Amino acid sequence: MTAMEPLRVLELYSGIGGMHCALRESGIAAEVVLAVDVNTCANDVYKHNFPNTDVWPKTIEGITLEGFNRLSFDMILMSPPCQPFTRIGLHGDVSDPRAKSFLYILEILPRLLKLPKYILLENVKGFEVSSARDTLLHTLETCGFQFQEFLLSPTCLGIPNSRLRYFLIAKLKPESFYFQSTRQILTTFPHSESGRPQRCCGSGESLKDDSNTVRVEDETTKASPGASSANTSSTQESILYKLETVKELERKQNQDQDVSVRVLKDYLEESIQESSQYLLTPKSLLRYALILDIVKPSCRRSTCFTKGYGHYVEGTGSVLQTAMDVEIDSAFKSLEDLSEEEKLANLSSLKLRYFTPREIANLHGFPASFDFPDKITVRQRYRLLGNSLNVHIVAKLISVLLR
């Protein structure tokens, strides 16, 4: 292959096209020769944005060895189903039926007439301790690939969203990386040509699973919302307002003070601020107020958005406070002493709303030109985005892989 010939790319589990967007952003000469996904709704979005790419609405197991060989691809981009490996799932790993297609790929790979030169894989944190990952690494070694694993979140690129994910890049020998690969999982991008390391996670963000769970104290230490820190033995674990400890509040404040991360305002739609379509309902406010992760446009953080966002409230992503003249602690103060009507008045004063699908797409790095067909509902858009990836991180890794 000469330098002028574009790479032939096979995109598996293509979803709405996050990998394809990343490929374009990386700037390398490449052509997606085929995208494969069983989700017909995702395929509609993909074809809407990439009308010239062939999309197969079929299972990967439905592609024969001969079919793979006919494609003659140079690169595989893939994001296999994450459900077998998620922290809140059943931990089925390779025994989960949804891992079957990925294991099929690993079975096919050594039998290809021509091995791809490059592979990039994305999955959830948790994949790195799975049997599926062990099988992947063994297959890559058998086929003669050099590889490097990562655990990266968008904050490493200054994006105010925590979405910690596993990534792997692999290159067929004798080609090699420009950096010294290691069997350790990197939590930052490899050193730049200047020799200086790239940014890692933002201030206050750890490499723990960033699933949106709310910490609830044991019954022996639980205090009511608004309780003073003097009411418990440990100041760091005392409940302030909401179900939030001093320690957690300090962590969020540290993140908001990290000026290397952009503010959320840069990713918001200006015309949406108080749109009733996205405001939380009175029922949701009364039921879930104490466990909401509330952010303002001036914040430099937000939690991971999942596919249930906009439909379910608990643990699916941050909500935005659009009333800038109201202090959050005053809205939550002494809620237990108020009538339901008074509680609702307090909480409604914050004007809390969901992030729009376009705003989540912005945080995920999808370009402004990326769009959804009109027939895709708001709920479907949230589900598709929750299953997608961060375009900027993948674009950066493609550049690292091809350098």
Image: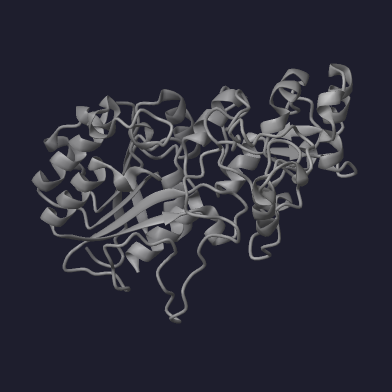
Q: Is residue 164 left or right of residue 230?
A: left
Q: How many marks?
A: 0
Q: Residue at 28% across / 66% down in the picture?
A: 182
**Where residue 270 sits in the image (x, y, percent)?**
78, 43
Relative placement, left or right, of 11 versus 244 is: left
Whether residue 350 is visible, yes or no, is no
State left or right for residue 183 relative to residue 213. left
Whether residue 230 is visible here, answered yes or no, is yes
**Is 312 above or below relative to 149?**
above
User: Where is residue 49 shown, x and y percent of the image?
Assistant: 50, 38
The quadrant holding residue 13 is top left
Colouring: one colour
Foreground residue, 392 or 303?
303
**Picture layout, residue 195 above or below residue 365:** below
| Image coordinates for residue 332, horizontal then vertical, percent | 81, 34
Residue pictured at 47% horizontal, 49% vertical: 208
Q: Residue at x 42, y 46 (%)?
A: 20
112 or 310: nearer the viewer: 310
Q: Position of residue 47 (x, y in %)?
A: 45, 33
Q: Quadrant of the C terminus?
A: bottom left
Query: In what quadrant of the picture does the N terminus appear?
Result: bottom left
Residue 148, image quadrant: bottom left
| 328 on left or right of 261 | right
